[in-house]
Amino acid sequence: MNLLFARFFSTVFHPIFIPFYSLLIVLYMFPYRYIHIYDKIWNLTIGIIIAMTMVMPAIIVFIMKKLKIVEDYDLSRQKQRIFPYLIFFFFYLMTFLTIKPKINSSPVFMEDSLIASVLLGATISLCLAFFLNNFLKVSVHAMGVTNLFMVVSLLSRNSHQMTFFLVLISLLAVGFTGSARIYLRAHTPREVYYGIFCGILGQLLAFLVYFDKSL
């Protein structure tokens, strides 16, 4: 793997994009599940997910960089990841609670247990990474792309769409992204393995709680 490909996979599978990718996967696998949703409600729901899992966390990390609370956007030092972890965890949890079905459903945006379960898996994975960060730096890139692989794998048995190539591509993405982080010397192999562990366990726990109930 050369430098160009390593940076490509690190950028394309940056953890900040993973919740949105997961949402696209859910839409591909279960297109008829959301066919009754009005465009205005659906667009607002997508906007909420993008704003709370991508835009707001990115803005806060940008501000933290400008205030020199963190040294770089890659959060290369283990200790400087504490506050960003907490920020992402807060926004992921709020997004999950927003999308999670409630007794009094919102008339403005969509509440869906399947999308909520994916967000729950990402939240649990991040919580695990935060805990392990006390002992070593965890590859959040590896965690995120493994989340994506687990979403595809766990949902594929219930989907009527062709998912073999999607599972294969997501598995290759785990391998290439993990290798890229090692090649760029951003992480050691052990840190990548811990990230993969967090991604697997987080989505697996969410599957046991929500996935079967939402299909």
Image (cartoon, grey):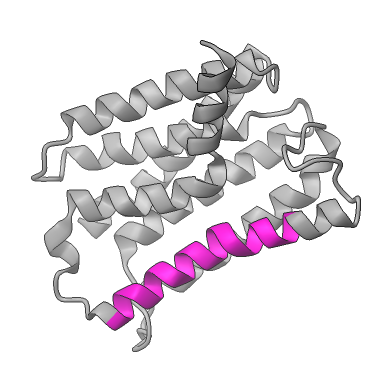
Tell me the residue at 40%/38% (across/down): 148
Report the number of numbered marks: 0
Is the C terminus in the top left, top right, bottom left or bottom right quadrant? bottom left
Is 27 above or below relative to 112? above
135 displayed left or right of 184: right
Q: Which portion, as a residue range, is magenta?
A: 40-61
Instruction: Tell me if 137 is positioned left or right of 141 in this view.
Output: right
- Residue 96 visible in the shown view: no
Q: Quadrant of residue 57?
A: bottom right
Q: Residue at x 70, y 23 (%)?
A: 186
Picture quarter containing residue 111? bottom left
Magenta region, main secondary structure: helix
Residue drawn at 26 percent across, 29 percent down = 167
Tell me if residue 189 can be seen.
yes
Tell me which corner region of the image, top left, top right, bottom left or bottom right, holds residue 37: bottom left
Locate residue 64, reporting x and y percent: 82, 55
Q: Nearer the viewer, residue 23 or 124?
A: 23
Can you say whether 103 is above or below 93 in the image? below
| Frontmost residue, 150 versus 104 | 150
> Is residue 44 covered in magenta?
yes
Which residue is at the far left? 160
Foreground residue among 63 and 3: 3
**Residue 91: x, y in percent?**
60, 62
Task: Name the residue rendered at 85%, 37% in the picture.
Answer: 79
Residue 141, percent from left and from top: 57, 33
Task: Decide: is 128 above or below 35.
Answer: above
Q: Residue furthest front?
A: 4
Q: Position of residue 82 (x, y in %)?
A: 79, 45
Is 96 part of what is drawn in magenta?
A: no
